Amino acid sequence: MSLEKIYSLYKTMEQEKVILSFNGVVTADFLTAVLDIMENKMSNLNDSPKIKKKVFNVLVECLQNLYHHIDEEDDLKKMSKRSKSALVMVVKDMGDFFVQTGNYIDKKSVSILDERLKKINSLDKEDLREYYREVLGIGNVSSKGTAGLGMIDIARKSGNKLEYEFLEIDEEFSFFSLNVKID
Amino acid sequence: MNMENILREGSAKTPAVSFDSTSGILELKGRSIPENSVEFYKPLNDWIDSYGSTPCDKTVVDIKLEYFNTSSSKCILDLFKKLERINLKGTEVHVNWYFEQDDEDMEEAGEDYQAIIKLPFKMIEVEEI
């Protein structure tokens, strides 16, 4: 990156009120490190313990979704570098927090994910709780125990609709951007 | 009952575990956010199976979790299902679900399990776990 771009990126982060930003392959160690840093950072903020806990919980679930997404690929070596990386950001704007993630996904996975998110966004608080119980009770556990609950839990903790977008990149990939508001 | 007890210290991502076959007290305490929860919970479930063959008259399960991720939630359900299976077969199983004051999420989580599981479930609110 050229020198002027460093400043330009810095200013953008400042304007967008990004308090944490990571870009890279979401390994287990990476995950642990990010959570550790976030915990320390949060302990220095003046917000209520309740909202801090929710932000932390949403971050855990988002990161673990990304981790498992990579993990599900059959051959890590065959995966292009692009499909292993993700961007994770936490934004704090006055009393509101936003957890934002961006990652490449296989175009074939887009419609299933889109449907799931549309369904989650269509449910109110009580229905979301019911849906969570339904998936918990009868869901199939993948070999890693993910059970399909992640997004439902993120929506419950957030209390807001999940904002997301799929950007078509090329024949194989789309880019999935997610914005979770916690207030 | 000659069974090895489980005594594990908690870590940043996994809870402290104390499963005692002599006292019949099973405790999970701390945070449960491992990436691979199936791996973590398997030995606990296996232990309950063995314990079930010669259990104490009363089995008390103390769940003192500050937070658990969704990956753990299914495993915790499976743990409860194992306990359901041994209940009233030589032992009476009682579950105590602890949650911190004002922690609606953990309170609701306890209620979610209470609704699915057929075991005597007690919700206990504490100041700090």
Image (cartoon, grey):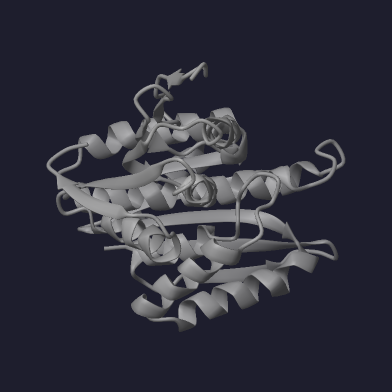
Residue B57's place in the image compared with B23, above or below, is: below
Residue A62's place in the image compared with A180, above or below, is: above
Q: As drawn, is B5 to the left or to the right of B49?
A: left
- Which image quarter is the C terminus of chain A in? bottom left
Q: Residue at x 31, y 53 (%)?
A: A54
Q: Position of residue A3 (x, y in %)?
A: 52, 35
Nearer to us in this view, B98 or A72: B98
Query: Where, by quadrant of the figure, is residue B14 drawn?
Result: top left
Q: As drawn, is B73 to the left or to the right of A17?
A: right
Residue A124's place in the image compared with A79, above or below, is: below
Q: Position of residue A82 (x, y in %)?
A: 73, 46
Query: Residue furthest toward the left?
Result: B127
Q: Residue at x 82, y 44 (%)?
A: A79
- Which image quarter is the N terminus of chain A in? top right
Q: Position of residue B83 (x, y in %)?
A: 48, 45
Q: Residue at x 60, y 56 (%)?
A: A147
Nearer to us in this view, A34 or A24: A34
Nearer to us in this view, A98 or B84: B84
Q: Position of residue B95 (x, y in %)?
A: 33, 47
Residue A40's place in the image compared with A144, above or below, is: above
